[in-house]
Image: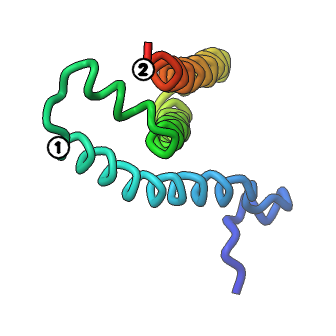
Amino acid sequence: MNLKSPLGSALGQGSANSGTEHFWGQRLSAVALVPLTIWFAVALLGMPGLDYYTVSAWAAAPLHAILLSLLVIALVYHSALGTQVVAEDYIHTPGSRLVVLAFLRLAHIVLAAAGIFSVFLIATRAGA
């Protein structure tokens, strides 16, 4: 039994073999986000106050700074994969799709850098 379409059989082309890595990246980032998001929500709800000094002192702890950085990375990576799928599915002009995908990639790199830099600044300036 052949599962290829008649056109695919005639051209000798099958699957592009490019979706598995994207699929697993999206699933693994979602799995990583579950405990990180629960930790973040529980930590914030457990604080006596949510003023700037309390939160920045909390974020300055090494474990919290590392977990916050991991949360930022997982969020941005998951968002990048999701918006890539949306752009690929709904933008049909190849030139426009390339421009949007390049913009989305650059925007997510900037967001990741800004998020990690923000955690670093909070962690290093909390005592000042």
- Residue at image coords 37%, 57%: 34
The one of 90 and 66 positioned closer to us in this rendering = 66
| The quarter of the displayed image where residue 10 is located | bottom right
| The quarter of the displayed image where residue 117 is located | top right
> What amino acid is at disc 1?
Leu
Mark 1 → mark 2, Cα distance in angstroms = 20 Å
Say whether residue 12 is left or right of residue 40: right
Please determine whether, in this image, residue 29 is positioned above or below residue 115.
Answer: below
Q: Which of marks 1 and 2 is in front?
A: 2
- Residue at image coords 26%, 18%: 52
- The residue labelled by disc 2 is 126
The percent position of residue 60, horizontal first and vertical second, equals 44, 31
Residue 11 in sight in this render: yes
Q: Residue furthest bottom?
A: 1
Mark 1 or mark 2, earlier in chain: 1
Q: Residue 26 carries which label?
A: none
Tag 1 near tag 2, CB within 8 Å: no
Say whether residue 53 is left or right of residue 35: left
Please determine whether, in this image, residue 55 is positioned above or below residue 73.
Answer: above
* Quarter of the figure that contains the C terminus: top left
The percent position of residue 126, horizontal first and vertical second, equals 42, 20
> What amino acid is at disc 2?
Ala
Residue 93 in sight in this render: no
- The residue labelled by disc 1 is 45
The percent position of residue 6, horizontal first and vertical second, equals 71, 65
Colouring style: rainbow
